[in-house]
Protein backbone atom coordinates (compact mmCIF):
# COMPACT_ATOMS: atom_id res chain seq x y z
CA UNK A 1 0.00 0.00 0.00
CA UNK A 2 1.03 3.56 -0.69
CA UNK A 3 0.71 6.62 1.59
CA UNK A 4 -1.47 8.32 -1.03
CA UNK A 5 -4.20 5.71 -0.51
CA UNK A 6 -4.67 6.47 3.19
CA UNK A 7 -6.66 9.69 2.92
CA UNK A 8 -4.00 12.06 4.25
CA UNK A 9 -4.03 15.70 3.14
CA UNK A 10 -1.68 16.86 0.35
CA UNK A 11 0.38 18.89 2.84
CA UNK A 12 0.86 15.88 5.09
CA UNK A 13 1.78 13.71 2.11
CA UNK A 14 4.44 16.27 1.22
CA UNK A 15 5.84 16.01 4.74
CA UNK A 16 5.84 12.21 4.50
CA UNK A 17 7.83 12.36 1.26
CA UNK A 18 10.21 14.90 2.81
CA UNK A 19 10.76 12.46 5.71
CA UNK A 20 11.87 9.85 3.21
CA UNK A 21 9.11 7.36 4.01
CA UNK A 22 8.15 5.37 0.96
CA UNK A 23 5.62 2.95 2.44
CA UNK A 24 3.39 3.04 5.48
CA UNK A 25 4.24 0.60 8.25
CA UNK A 26 1.51 -1.95 9.13
CA UNK A 27 0.18 0.11 12.04
CA UNK A 28 0.07 3.24 9.87
CA UNK A 29 -1.71 1.38 7.11
CA UNK A 30 -4.37 0.17 9.52
CA UNK A 31 -4.72 3.12 11.88
CA UNK A 32 -4.54 6.19 9.63
CA UNK A 33 -7.80 5.62 7.64
CA UNK A 34 -9.65 4.79 10.88
CA UNK A 35 -8.41 7.90 12.68
CA UNK A 36 -9.49 9.97 9.69
CA UNK A 37 -12.95 8.38 9.97
CA UNK A 38 -13.02 9.73 13.54
CA UNK A 39 -13.08 6.25 15.06
CA UNK A 40 -11.55 5.46 18.45
CA UNK A 41 -8.46 3.32 18.00
CA UNK A 42 -6.89 0.82 20.36
CA UNK A 43 -3.37 0.15 19.07
CA UNK A 44 -1.41 -2.63 20.69
CA UNK A 45 2.06 -1.84 19.49
CA UNK A 46 5.38 -0.78 20.84
CA UNK A 47 7.88 1.86 19.75
CA UNK A 48 9.74 1.11 16.56
CA UNK A 49 6.56 0.13 14.70
CA UNK A 50 5.95 3.67 13.41
CA UNK A 51 3.06 4.23 15.81
CA UNK A 52 3.87 7.90 16.42
CA UNK A 53 3.30 8.76 12.75
CA UNK A 54 0.23 6.51 12.84
CA UNK A 55 -1.50 9.08 15.05
CA UNK A 56 0.36 12.33 14.25
CA UNK A 57 -0.18 12.22 10.46
CA UNK A 58 -3.98 11.83 10.53
CA UNK A 59 -4.23 14.27 13.45
CA UNK A 60 -2.47 16.94 11.41
CA UNK A 61 -4.80 16.23 8.49
CA UNK A 62 -7.85 16.65 10.74
CA UNK A 63 -6.45 19.77 12.41
CA UNK A 64 -6.05 21.56 9.09
CA UNK A 65 -9.74 22.49 9.48
CA UNK A 66 -10.50 24.89 12.32
CA UNK A 67 -8.50 27.08 14.67
CA UNK A 68 -7.28 26.94 18.24
CA UNK A 69 -8.81 29.16 20.91
CA UNK A 70 -6.99 30.70 23.86
CA UNK A 71 -6.48 28.28 26.75
CA UNK A 72 -8.50 25.59 24.98
CA UNK A 73 -6.24 23.10 23.23
CA UNK A 74 -7.85 21.12 20.43
CA UNK A 75 -5.97 17.87 20.93
CA UNK A 76 -4.10 16.33 23.82
CA UNK A 77 -1.36 13.69 23.75
CA UNK A 78 -0.31 12.10 27.04
CA UNK A 79 3.15 10.55 27.31
CA UNK A 80 4.67 8.86 30.37
CA UNK A 81 8.09 10.54 30.22
CA UNK A 82 9.43 13.91 29.28
CA UNK A 83 11.72 12.42 26.68
CA UNK A 84 8.90 10.61 24.93
CA UNK A 85 6.81 13.80 25.02
CA UNK A 86 9.70 15.74 23.50
CA UNK A 87 10.11 13.05 20.87
CA UNK A 88 6.45 13.33 19.86
CA UNK A 89 6.81 17.12 19.69
CA UNK A 90 9.74 16.61 17.31
CA UNK A 91 7.56 14.40 15.12
CA UNK A 92 4.89 17.09 14.96
CA UNK A 93 7.45 19.73 14.09
CA UNK A 94 8.86 17.48 11.38
CA UNK A 95 5.47 16.73 9.82
CA UNK A 96 4.00 20.24 10.13
CA UNK A 97 6.89 22.31 8.80
CA UNK A 98 5.38 25.09 6.70
CA UNK A 99 1.96 24.68 8.35
CA UNK A 100 0.38 26.93 10.94
CA UNK A 101 -0.20 24.52 13.81
CA UNK A 102 0.64 25.50 17.35
CA UNK A 103 2.23 22.70 19.33
CA UNK A 104 2.96 23.04 23.06
CA UNK A 105 4.91 20.72 25.31
CA UNK A 106 3.94 20.55 28.99
CA UNK A 107 6.56 18.61 30.88
CA UNK A 108 8.01 18.85 34.35
CA UNK A 109 11.48 20.14 35.14
CA UNK A 110 11.00 23.37 33.18
CA UNK A 111 9.31 26.60 34.27
CA UNK A 112 5.57 27.12 34.02
CA UNK A 113 5.88 30.62 32.56
CA UNK A 114 6.65 29.78 28.93
CA UNK A 115 4.16 26.93 28.99
CA UNK A 116 1.44 29.28 30.32
CA UNK A 117 2.15 31.76 27.57
CA UNK A 118 1.85 29.14 24.86
CA UNK A 119 -1.43 27.84 26.25
CA UNK A 120 -2.81 31.36 26.47
CA UNK A 121 -2.06 31.95 22.79
CA UNK A 122 -4.08 28.93 21.70
CA UNK A 123 -2.76 25.45 21.05
CA UNK A 124 -3.70 22.93 18.38
CA UNK A 125 -1.66 20.09 19.84
CA UNK A 126 -0.83 19.81 23.51
CA UNK A 127 1.73 17.13 24.39
CA UNK A 128 2.05 16.52 28.11
CA UNK A 129 3.11 14.26 30.91
CA UNK A 130 0.12 13.63 33.23
CA UNK A 131 1.53 15.29 36.36
CA UNK A 132 2.41 18.56 34.67
CA UNK A 133 -0.88 18.67 32.79
CA UNK A 134 -2.82 18.36 36.04
CA UNK A 135 -0.66 21.02 37.67
CA UNK A 136 -1.55 23.44 34.87
CA UNK A 137 -5.21 22.48 35.11
CA UNK A 138 -5.26 23.02 38.86
CA UNK A 139 -3.72 26.46 38.41
CA UNK A 140 -6.76 27.31 36.31
CA UNK A 141 -4.71 28.19 33.26
CA UNK A 142 -5.95 25.43 31.06
CA UNK A 143 -9.38 24.32 29.85
CA UNK A 144 -9.81 20.83 28.54
CA UNK A 145 -13.34 21.27 27.28
CA UNK A 146 -12.22 21.91 23.69
CA UNK A 147 -10.33 18.63 23.27
CA UNK A 148 -11.41 16.88 20.06
CA UNK A 149 -8.80 14.13 20.06
CA UNK A 150 -7.17 12.52 23.10
CA UNK A 151 -4.11 10.31 22.58
CA UNK A 152 -2.88 8.10 25.40
CA UNK A 153 0.47 6.70 24.41
CA UNK A 154 2.54 3.98 26.11
CA UNK A 155 -0.31 3.18 28.48
CA UNK A 156 1.43 0.20 30.06
CA UNK A 157 4.38 2.44 30.92
CA UNK A 158 1.89 4.81 32.56
CA UNK A 159 0.67 1.88 34.62
CA UNK A 160 4.20 0.92 35.67
CA UNK A 161 4.83 4.50 36.70
CA UNK A 162 1.66 4.85 38.77
CA UNK A 163 -0.03 7.32 36.40
CA UNK A 164 -3.27 5.43 35.85
CA UNK A 165 -5.31 7.41 38.44
CA UNK A 166 -4.12 10.62 36.75
CA UNK A 167 -5.09 9.24 33.35
CA UNK A 168 -8.55 8.33 34.63
CA UNK A 169 -8.96 11.84 36.01
CA UNK A 170 -7.89 13.43 32.76
CA UNK A 171 -10.22 11.19 30.74
CA UNK A 172 -13.10 12.47 32.83
CA UNK A 173 -12.06 16.09 32.31
CA UNK A 174 -12.11 16.01 28.49
CA UNK A 175 -15.42 16.00 26.58
CA UNK A 176 -17.25 12.69 26.37
CA UNK A 177 -17.59 13.13 22.61
CA UNK A 178 -13.88 13.35 21.88
CA UNK A 179 -12.08 10.78 19.75
CA UNK A 180 -9.64 8.63 21.72
CA UNK A 181 -6.50 6.98 20.34
CA UNK A 182 -4.97 4.61 22.83
CA UNK A 183 -1.60 2.84 22.47
CA UNK A 184 -0.01 0.24 24.68
CA UNK A 185 2.65 -2.39 24.04
CA UNK A 186 0.88 -4.87 26.35
CA UNK A 187 -2.64 -5.23 27.71
CA UNK A 188 -2.57 -6.09 31.42
CA UNK A 189 -6.03 -6.16 33.09
CA UNK A 190 -5.74 -2.62 34.48
CA UNK A 191 -5.16 -1.28 30.98
CA UNK A 192 -7.97 -3.40 29.57
CA UNK A 193 -10.27 -1.89 32.19
CA UNK A 194 -9.30 1.65 31.21
CA UNK A 195 -9.95 0.97 27.53
CA UNK A 196 -13.35 -0.47 28.35
CA UNK A 197 -14.23 2.58 30.42
CA UNK A 198 -12.98 5.33 28.13
CA UNK A 199 -13.01 4.12 24.52
CA UNK A 200 -16.17 3.99 22.42
CA UNK A 201 -16.34 1.03 20.04
CA UNK A 202 -12.64 1.17 19.32
CA UNK A 203 -11.05 -0.34 16.25
CA UNK A 204 -8.52 -2.71 17.65
CA UNK A 205 -5.19 -2.95 15.85
CA UNK A 206 -2.59 -5.32 17.16
CA UNK A 207 0.96 -5.43 15.92
CA UNK A 208 2.41 -8.69 17.15
CA UNK A 209 4.91 -8.10 19.87
CA UNK A 210 8.53 -8.68 19.09
CA UNK A 211 8.97 -11.28 21.80
CA UNK A 212 12.20 -12.29 20.22
CA UNK A 213 14.88 -10.01 19.04
CA UNK A 214 15.80 -8.67 15.63
CA UNK A 215 17.60 -10.86 13.16
CA UNK A 216 20.28 -8.29 12.79
CA UNK A 217 21.36 -8.30 16.44
CA UNK A 218 24.24 -10.47 17.57
CA UNK A 219 23.73 -11.33 21.22
CA UNK A 220 26.53 -12.47 23.51
CA UNK A 221 26.99 -13.17 27.20
CA UNK A 222 30.13 -12.26 29.08
CA UNK A 223 30.99 -13.86 32.40
CA UNK A 224 32.18 -11.56 35.16
CA UNK A 225 32.74 -11.63 38.92
CA UNK A 226 30.04 -9.77 40.88
CA UNK A 227 32.50 -7.42 42.53
CA UNK A 228 31.59 -3.96 41.17
CA UNK A 229 35.12 -2.85 40.34
CA UNK A 230 35.85 -6.12 38.53
CA UNK A 231 32.54 -5.83 36.75
CA UNK A 232 33.40 -2.34 35.56
CA UNK A 233 36.75 -3.67 34.38
CA UNK A 234 34.91 -6.38 32.40
CA UNK A 235 32.77 -3.65 30.85
CA UNK A 236 35.75 -1.54 29.87
CA UNK A 237 37.50 -4.53 28.35
CA UNK A 238 34.39 -5.37 26.40
CA UNK A 239 34.01 -1.83 25.15
CA UNK A 240 37.66 -1.62 24.11
CA UNK A 241 37.66 -5.02 22.37
CA UNK A 242 34.33 -4.62 20.56
CA UNK A 243 34.65 -4.30 16.80
CA UNK A 244 33.14 -1.48 14.69
CA UNK A 245 31.63 0.43 17.57
CA UNK A 246 29.93 3.52 16.24
CA UNK A 247 28.17 4.22 19.51
CA UNK A 248 26.63 2.30 22.36
CA UNK A 249 24.15 2.36 25.22
CA UNK A 250 25.22 0.84 28.53
CA UNK A 251 22.25 -0.26 30.62
CA UNK A 252 22.32 -0.51 34.42
CA UNK A 253 19.48 -1.74 36.61
CA UNK A 254 19.82 1.07 39.13
CA UNK A 255 20.12 4.80 38.86
CA UNK A 256 22.96 4.80 41.39
CA UNK A 257 24.92 2.40 39.18
CA UNK A 258 24.26 4.56 36.12
CA UNK A 259 25.98 7.36 37.99
CA UNK A 260 28.90 5.21 39.17
CA UNK A 261 29.51 3.53 35.79
CA UNK A 262 29.25 6.85 33.97
CA UNK A 263 31.83 8.53 36.25
CA UNK A 264 34.12 5.54 36.04
CA UNK A 265 34.00 5.36 32.24
CA UNK A 266 34.60 9.08 31.99
CA UNK A 267 37.63 8.73 34.26
CA UNK A 268 38.95 6.01 31.98
CA UNK A 269 38.75 8.30 28.96
CA UNK A 270 35.51 7.19 27.30
CA UNK A 271 33.26 9.74 25.61
CA UNK A 272 30.18 9.09 27.69
CA UNK A 273 26.97 10.72 28.97
CA UNK A 274 24.43 9.49 31.53
CA UNK A 275 20.62 9.35 31.50
CA UNK A 276 18.48 8.49 34.49
CA UNK A 277 15.37 9.79 36.19
CA UNK A 278 17.11 11.67 39.00
CA UNK A 279 18.92 14.00 36.64
CA UNK A 280 17.37 17.41 36.05
CA UNK A 281 15.69 18.01 32.74
CA UNK A 282 18.45 20.16 31.28
CA UNK A 283 21.11 17.54 31.98
CA UNK A 284 18.88 14.82 30.49
CA UNK A 285 18.32 16.82 27.32
CA UNK A 286 22.03 17.64 26.97
CA UNK A 287 22.96 13.96 27.42
CA UNK A 288 20.44 12.71 24.93
CA UNK A 289 21.15 15.39 22.35
CA UNK A 290 24.90 14.77 22.67
CA UNK A 291 24.42 11.06 22.14
CA UNK A 292 22.02 11.51 19.23
CA UNK A 293 24.34 14.01 17.55
CA UNK A 294 27.33 11.72 18.03
CA UNK A 295 29.34 14.14 20.17
CA UNK A 296 29.12 11.50 22.91
CA UNK A 297 29.92 7.98 21.84
CA UNK A 298 28.31 6.20 24.77
CA UNK A 299 25.24 6.69 26.93
CA UNK A 300 24.88 5.00 30.32
CA UNK A 301 21.17 4.68 31.04
CA UNK A 302 18.50 3.15 33.24
CA UNK A 303 15.61 1.27 31.62
CA UNK A 304 12.95 3.77 32.53
CA UNK A 305 14.86 6.73 31.13
CA UNK A 306 15.80 4.98 27.91
CA UNK A 307 12.59 3.11 27.17
CA UNK A 308 10.93 4.09 23.92
CA UNK A 309 13.59 6.58 22.94
CA UNK A 310 14.20 6.72 19.26
CA UNK A 311 17.90 6.84 18.52
CA UNK A 312 17.88 5.27 15.08
CA UNK A 313 21.44 4.12 14.68
CA UNK A 314 22.94 2.48 17.78
CA UNK A 315 25.63 -0.06 16.93
CA UNK A 316 26.16 -1.65 20.36
CA UNK A 317 24.25 -2.32 23.57
CA UNK A 318 26.15 -3.26 26.72
CA UNK A 319 24.06 -4.65 29.54
CA UNK A 320 26.21 -3.86 32.54
CA UNK A 321 23.52 -5.65 34.54
CA UNK A 322 21.29 -8.44 33.32
CA UNK A 323 17.81 -6.91 33.61
CA UNK A 324 15.49 -8.25 36.32
CA UNK A 325 12.55 -8.27 33.90
CA UNK A 326 13.09 -10.31 30.77
CA UNK A 327 10.96 -7.93 28.71
CA UNK A 328 13.45 -5.16 29.50
CA UNK A 329 16.13 -7.26 27.80
CA UNK A 330 14.13 -7.22 24.58
CA UNK A 331 13.62 -3.47 24.84
CA UNK A 332 17.26 -2.81 25.66
CA UNK A 333 18.78 -4.78 22.84
CA UNK A 334 16.09 -3.43 20.51
CA UNK A 335 17.94 -0.08 20.73
CA UNK A 336 20.39 -1.59 18.24
CA UNK A 337 19.87 -3.48 14.99
CA UNK A 338 17.08 -1.09 14.00
CA UNK A 339 15.81 -0.71 10.45
CA UNK A 340 17.86 -3.62 9.13
CA UNK A 341 21.20 -2.36 10.44
CA UNK A 342 23.60 -4.72 12.19
CA UNK A 343 23.96 -4.47 15.93
CA UNK A 344 25.65 -6.24 18.81
CA UNK A 345 24.33 -6.67 22.33
CA UNK A 346 26.57 -7.86 25.17
CA UNK A 347 25.21 -8.86 28.54
CA UNK A 348 27.52 -9.16 31.52
CA UNK A 349 26.52 -12.15 33.64
CA UNK A 350 27.71 -12.59 37.21
CA UNK A 351 27.16 -15.61 39.46
CA UNK A 352 24.06 -13.88 40.85
CA UNK A 353 22.37 -13.58 37.46
CA UNK A 354 21.35 -17.16 36.87
CA UNK A 355 17.61 -16.63 37.28
CA UNK A 356 17.56 -13.43 35.26
CA UNK A 357 19.38 -15.13 32.43
CA UNK A 358 17.05 -18.13 32.49
CA UNK A 359 14.05 -15.78 32.26
CA UNK A 360 15.59 -13.88 29.34
CA UNK A 361 16.35 -17.04 27.42
CA UNK A 362 12.86 -18.34 28.09
CA UNK A 363 11.38 -15.13 26.75
CA UNK A 364 13.42 -14.97 23.56
CA UNK A 365 13.04 -18.75 23.17
CA UNK A 366 16.69 -19.44 22.55
CA UNK A 367 19.95 -19.68 24.40
CA UNK A 368 22.54 -16.95 24.04
CA UNK A 369 26.17 -17.76 23.36
CA UNK A 370 29.07 -16.82 25.55
CA UNK A 371 31.90 -14.63 24.45
CA UNK A 372 34.87 -16.33 26.12
CA UNK A 373 34.39 -18.76 29.00
CA UNK A 374 30.95 -19.56 30.40
CA UNK A 375 30.25 -18.52 33.95
CA UNK A 376 30.76 -22.12 35.11
CA UNK A 377 34.07 -22.44 33.27
CA UNK A 378 35.31 -19.10 34.58
CA UNK A 379 34.88 -20.39 38.18
CA UNK A 380 34.86 -16.98 39.75
CA UNK A 381 35.55 -16.68 43.41
CA UNK A 382 32.46 -14.62 43.85
CA UNK A 383 32.75 -11.51 45.98
CA UNK A 384 30.03 -10.76 48.53
CA UNK A 385 26.92 -9.92 46.57
CA UNK A 386 26.14 -6.29 46.09
CA UNK A 387 22.92 -7.12 44.30
CA UNK A 388 19.90 -7.43 46.56
CA UNK A 389 17.27 -10.07 46.29
CA UNK A 390 18.50 -12.09 43.37
CA UNK A 391 19.16 -15.83 43.35
CA UNK A 392 21.58 -17.32 45.85
CA UNK A 393 25.25 -18.04 45.81
CA UNK A 394 24.55 -21.72 45.47
CA UNK A 395 22.81 -20.86 42.21
CA UNK A 396 26.06 -19.69 40.71
CA UNK A 397 26.70 -21.27 37.36
CA UNK A 398 24.23 -24.08 37.99
CA UNK A 399 22.49 -25.35 34.94
CA UNK A 400 24.49 -23.16 32.66
CA UNK A 401 27.83 -24.86 32.52
CA UNK A 402 27.05 -27.36 29.80
CA UNK A 403 27.32 -25.05 26.86
CA UNK A 404 30.63 -24.58 25.18
CA UNK A 405 31.95 -21.11 24.54
CA UNK A 406 32.19 -20.19 20.90
CA UNK A 407 35.08 -18.54 19.16
CA UNK A 408 34.59 -14.78 19.17
CA UNK A 409 34.68 -14.29 15.40
CA UNK A 410 32.14 -16.99 14.66
CA UNK A 411 29.81 -15.80 17.38
CA UNK A 412 29.96 -12.20 16.26
CA UNK A 413 28.92 -12.99 12.73
CA UNK A 414 25.88 -14.83 13.87
CA UNK A 415 22.42 -13.53 13.13
CA UNK A 416 19.66 -14.55 15.50
CA UNK A 417 15.97 -15.38 15.56
CA UNK A 418 13.38 -12.76 14.90
CA UNK A 419 9.66 -12.44 14.90
CA UNK A 420 8.50 -9.76 12.54
CA UNK A 421 6.12 -7.12 13.70
CA UNK A 422 3.35 -8.78 11.75
CA UNK A 423 0.07 -6.89 11.83
CA UNK A 424 -2.87 -8.57 13.47
CA UNK A 425 -6.27 -6.86 13.47
CA UNK A 426 -9.09 -7.58 15.86
CA UNK A 427 -7.33 -10.30 17.74
CA UNK A 428 -7.57 -11.03 21.43
CA UNK A 429 -4.70 -9.44 23.36
CA UNK A 430 -1.89 -11.72 24.37
CA UNK A 431 -1.31 -11.64 28.09
CA UNK A 432 2.20 -10.74 29.16
CA UNK A 433 3.86 -12.38 32.12
CA UNK A 434 3.67 -9.62 34.71
CA UNK A 435 4.46 -9.63 38.39
CA UNK A 436 1.49 -10.41 40.59
CA UNK A 437 -0.48 -7.34 41.59
CA UNK A 438 0.39 -7.79 45.23
CA UNK A 439 4.10 -7.70 44.31
CA UNK A 440 3.66 -4.30 42.82
CA UNK A 441 3.56 -1.41 45.23
CA UNK A 442 0.27 0.41 45.19
CA UNK A 443 -0.24 3.88 43.89
CA UNK A 444 -0.66 5.09 47.49
CA UNK A 445 3.07 4.70 47.99
CA UNK A 446 3.62 7.71 45.79
CA UNK A 447 3.24 11.03 47.50
CA UNK A 448 -0.30 12.33 47.20
CA UNK A 449 -0.65 15.33 44.95
CA UNK A 450 -1.13 17.66 47.87
CA UNK A 451 1.91 16.22 49.64
CA UNK A 452 4.12 16.82 46.67
CA UNK A 453 6.62 19.65 46.91
CA UNK A 454 5.32 23.17 46.31
CA UNK A 455 5.40 24.39 42.77
CA UNK A 456 8.57 26.39 43.07
CA UNK A 457 10.59 23.46 44.25
CA UNK A 458 8.64 21.18 41.99
CA UNK A 459 10.10 22.81 38.91
CA UNK A 460 13.53 21.75 40.08
CA UNK A 461 12.45 18.25 41.05
CA UNK A 462 12.71 15.33 38.70
CA UNK A 463 9.23 14.30 37.61
CA UNK A 464 7.74 11.01 38.71
CA UNK A 465 9.26 9.14 35.84
CA UNK A 466 10.10 6.01 37.80
CA UNK A 467 7.89 3.07 38.28
CA UNK A 468 6.82 2.51 41.87
CA UNK A 469 7.47 -1.18 41.24
CA UNK A 470 10.95 -0.36 40.11
CA UNK A 471 11.54 2.05 42.98
CA UNK A 472 11.93 -0.94 45.20
CA UNK A 473 13.51 -3.42 42.92
CA UNK A 474 15.74 -1.62 40.53
CA UNK A 475 16.08 1.99 40.98
CA UNK A 476 16.92 2.88 44.56
CA UNK A 477 13.64 4.67 45.09
CA UNK A 478 12.11 5.54 48.45
CA UNK A 479 11.93 2.82 51.06
CA UNK A 480 8.34 1.95 52.04
CA UNK A 481 7.22 3.36 55.38
CA UNK A 482 6.38 0.94 58.18
CA UNK A 483 5.14 -2.31 56.72
CA UNK A 484 4.82 -0.91 53.20
CA UNK A 485 2.27 -2.96 51.29
CA UNK A 486 2.14 -5.76 53.78
CA UNK A 487 -0.86 -6.06 56.10
CA UNK A 488 -0.26 -8.69 58.79
CA UNK A 489 -3.11 -11.19 59.19
CA UNK A 490 -3.80 -10.33 62.85
CA UNK A 491 -4.63 -6.74 61.91
CA UNK A 492 -7.31 -7.94 59.54
CA UNK A 493 -9.09 -10.12 62.13
CA UNK A 494 -12.35 -8.72 63.49
CA UNK A 495 -12.72 -8.40 67.25
CA UNK A 496 -15.75 -7.94 69.45
CA UNK A 497 -15.84 -4.71 71.39
CA UNK A 498 -17.23 -4.94 74.88
P1 LIG B 1 7.98 5.01 16.36
O1 LIG B 1 7.52 3.60 16.40
O2 LIG B 1 6.88 5.96 16.19
O3 LIG B 1 8.87 5.32 17.53
O4 LIG B 1 8.88 5.17 15.03
C1 LIG B 1 10.12 4.58 14.89
C2 LIG B 1 10.94 5.19 13.76
O5 LIG B 1 10.38 4.83 12.49
C3 LIG B 1 11.03 6.71 13.76
O6 LIG B 1 12.38 7.08 13.63
C4 LIG B 1 10.24 7.16 12.55
O7 LIG B 1 10.81 8.31 11.97
C5 LIG B 1 10.38 5.96 11.63
N1 LIG B 1 9.24 5.78 10.71
C6 LIG B 1 7.93 6.00 10.99
N2 LIG B 1 7.16 5.69 9.94
C7 LIG B 1 7.98 5.26 8.95
C8 LIG B 1 7.77 4.79 7.61
N3 LIG B 1 6.56 4.70 7.09
N4 LIG B 1 8.85 4.43 6.91
C9 LIG B 1 10.08 4.51 7.46
N5 LIG B 1 10.35 4.94 8.70
C10 LIG B 1 9.32 5.31 9.46
Image: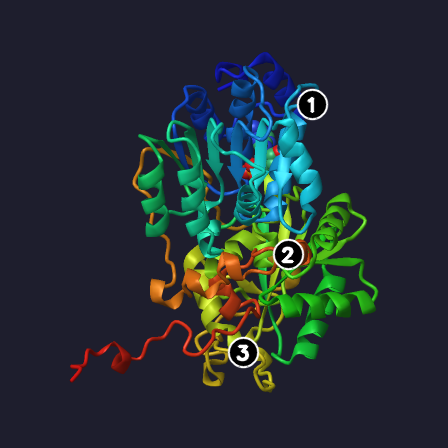
Does the CB distance between marks 3 and 1 fall below 8 Å?
Answer: no
Measure the C-alpha gap from mark 3 to mark 2. Answer: 41 Å
- Residue 103 in percent (x, y) is at 63, 30
User: If you read the primary sequence from the N terminus, does the residue marked by circle 2 or circle 1 appear first?
Assistant: 1
User: If you read the primary sequence from the N terminus, does the residue marked by circle 3 or circle 2 appear first?
Assistant: 3
Image height of 57 relative to 300, above or below: above
Q: Quadrant of the C terminus?
A: bottom left
Measure the C-alpha gap from mark 2 to mark 1. Answer: 33 Å
Q: Element under label 3?
A: helix
Does the CB distance between marks 3 and 2 fall below 8 Å?
Answer: no
Query: Which sits in the foreground, 376 or 404?
Result: 376
Q: Residue at x 40, y 64 (%)?
A: 440
Image height of 38 relative to 274, above or below: above
- Residue 340 in percent (x, y) is at 60, 39
Please tell me in which quarter of the rendered image ligand 1 is found. top right
Q: Residue at x 35, y 40 (%)?
A: 195
Q: Is residue 238 visible?
A: yes
Front: mark 2 or 1: 2
The residue carrying mark 3 is 351
Label 2 C-beta lies within 8 Å of the nearest ligand 1 atom: no
The residue carrying mark 1 is 97
Query: Which sits in the foreground, 65 or 122?
Result: 122
Residue sitting farthest toward the top: 10
The residue carrying mark 2 is 458
Query: Which sits in the foreground, 358 or 17?
Result: 17
Q: Element under label 1?
A: loop
User: If you read the primary sequence from the N terminus, does the residue marked by circle 3 or circle 1 appear first?
Assistant: 1
Measure the C-alpha gap from mark 3 to mark 1. Answer: 53 Å
Amino acid sequence: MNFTELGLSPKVLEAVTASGYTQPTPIQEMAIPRVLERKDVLGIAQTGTGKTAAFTLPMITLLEQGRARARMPRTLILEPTRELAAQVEESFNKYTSGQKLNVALLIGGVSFGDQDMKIARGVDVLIATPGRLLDHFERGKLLLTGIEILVIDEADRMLDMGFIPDIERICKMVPFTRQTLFFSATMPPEIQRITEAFLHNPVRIEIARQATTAETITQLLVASPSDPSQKRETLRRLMRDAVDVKNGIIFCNRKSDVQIVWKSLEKHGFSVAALHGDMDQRARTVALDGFRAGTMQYLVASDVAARGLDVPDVSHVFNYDAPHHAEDYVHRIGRTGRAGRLGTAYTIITPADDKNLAAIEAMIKRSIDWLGPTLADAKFEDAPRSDRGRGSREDAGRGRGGRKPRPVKEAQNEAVVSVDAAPVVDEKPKREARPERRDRPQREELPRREERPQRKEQAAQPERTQSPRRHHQDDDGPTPKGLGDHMPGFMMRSTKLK
